[in-house]
Amino acid sequence: MAEQILLKHKVVSLDGYKASGGWTALEKATRMEPAAIIDEVKKSGLRGRGGAGFPAGLKWSFIPKDSAKERYVVCNADEGEPGTFKDRELIRMNPYLLIEGMAIAGRAIGAKTGYIYVRGEFAREAALLEKCIGEAKVAGFLGDKLFGSGFSFDLHVHKGAGAYICGEETALLESIEGRRGQPRLKPPFPAVEGLFACPTVINNVETLAAVPAIIEKGGAWYAGLGAGKSTGTKLFSISGPVKKPGVYEAELGIPFKTFLEEYAGGMAEGKKLKAVIPGGSSTPVLTAEEAMNARLDYESLAAAGSMLGSGGIIVIAEDTCMVDALLVLARFYHHESCGQCTPCREGTGWTEKVLRRFEEGGAGPGDADLLLSISNNMVGRTICPLADALAMPVISFITKFREEFDAHAAGNTCRPGRTK
Amino acid sequence: MKKFKFSEEFNRKVAATVARYPKADAALIPLMQEVQRELGHFPEEAAQALANLLGISYARVKGVLTFYTMFRREPGGKYLLQVCRNLSCHMTGSVKLLEYLKARLGIEEGGTTHDGLFTLMTVECLGSCGTAPVMMVNDDYHENLTVEKLDKLISGLRAEAKAHK
């Protein structure tokens, strides 16, 4: 097994975390200049693990140096992208890693307060984080003047209330402020005007949890892992008909074939690979052949016409109907559209309706093209990427599995048999 | 509309909740969650009371109430069953589980059994796709479900409710 950074230790207590080497990175960070911390993270090449892959150190460096306002660190633990379940696993495995990472981020950008936005359904994980934060405060790892330095940092858990869109960073900020989770127009970007109109850094759980190791061992060490510009390790969630679905940590750049066979145990008995959604439900689908030739990193998957996204791999077998699978995704995005942009609000609903015609009878020969046309009118025309998140699967499903859509439209029963 | 009175427990928690934020109105969602935790749902009349408490409009509270799917505006059963229906669960049989629950409980999606024990709903991705199919019962996840497991679970919950009566 390759280098483990995030899932190395199962930690259930504050003492256990200390024994595993915990808090030494934070102590080191309190003695470092904030700019030096940001430089180290930049050097590591760490990129956002929530889906967008934006360089974390660069994001931190956008916080204005001369602002007199408060600054905030926000952790996005609103894990909800279908196929993604790594953050929940990480929190359960080692909640302290996230807490330490956030405190270091606070030191780097001059924030005294952080919020962890946990999706409402993760009630147990939110309670676990609250317990760990409480213990850390008592033990002096959070609170005033940490390690005898002038740096103070406090952390709060904020629970979501059931809205996929709050995983979009500006919708998440709206939600913390006690409003409907509707994404904001950018600019201003959160680094300049984020939470409570103050400079804010928002990172995914996995991104922040990687920070302590980077500060402890150095950015150059981290950059030595992975492949090219995709440095470090990544958590991959794999679900669908494989022998061992679950969350695995692997170096970026690992071939999908190796990952499927050596980590996930290969396809389940009697199942043949048909397609792979490599990075959460919004990333374009790959055919079995494309997937088996791809490596799991930002650049390789972009070159293969998809995205690394959140690393949420959904494996699809031959006996799954692609029309039915796409309908499930369309229903989801329609349900989760916040409704403020017309192309998304109407486009997701229209897409779902047309796909229902395919499944329930009544689709005509022009309907596959109609779906493509709707999608092409959604992409890039909205405030946030939720519209694109449905359009990308629609375009890739129809382009790569057109014969299944045409067979449905021709009135033939669904070829592989509907998933029931 | 009848006037809503917050519980003493709720009133004790307000200050600490508000203190977590630089602005009091940011405590809106946690306070709504607290009302729902106590009552099992968020009643209409609590919206105006909370608006008054935080100095915000009724429309703002109502907007939040109707935006987030975890807020329940009507009283429901003792056990809220939420069957995940997204792709990984769909491929591993969530449709069958839902059909089974409808038949066994004699209710449709959104319905509550006559004895007030179960409310049945579907939800989108619960973020536990590796152990699909998944269903939540109140705050707890039940994973790798089969009809047999579900059958035992429902019987177990009925027995539990009877024992606590």
Image: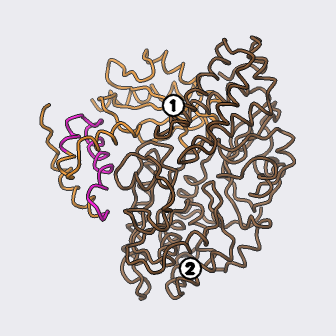
Chain colours: A brown, B orange
Residue for badge 2: A25
What crowding class fits label 1: few (fewer than 14 Cα within 10 Å), some (14-19), or many (20 or more)?
many
Q: For residue A57, what is the image quadrant? A: bottom right
Q: Is residue A325 left or right of residue A292?
A: left
User: Which residue appears at 72% of the width and 35% of the height?
Assistant: A395
Q: How far from the left and from the top, in percent, is residue B134?
A: 55, 36
Which residue occupies the foreground of this view, B24 or A159?
A: B24
Q: Is residue B152 magenta?
A: no
If the image is split into quadrants, where does the N terminus of chain B sit? top left
Residue for badge 1: B83
Is the residue A135 above or below the residue B153 in the image?
A: below
Q: For residue B118, what is the image quadrant? A: top left
Which residue occupies the foreground of this view, A325 or A27?
A: A325
Three-letter code for the amino acid on which mark 2 is drawn: Ala
Is the residue at mark 2 from the same chain as the one at mark 1? no
Q: How far from the left and from the top, in percent, is residue B130?
A: 64, 43
Which residue occupies the foreground of this view, A63 or A263?
A: A63
* Residue bounds of the magenta highlight: B20-49
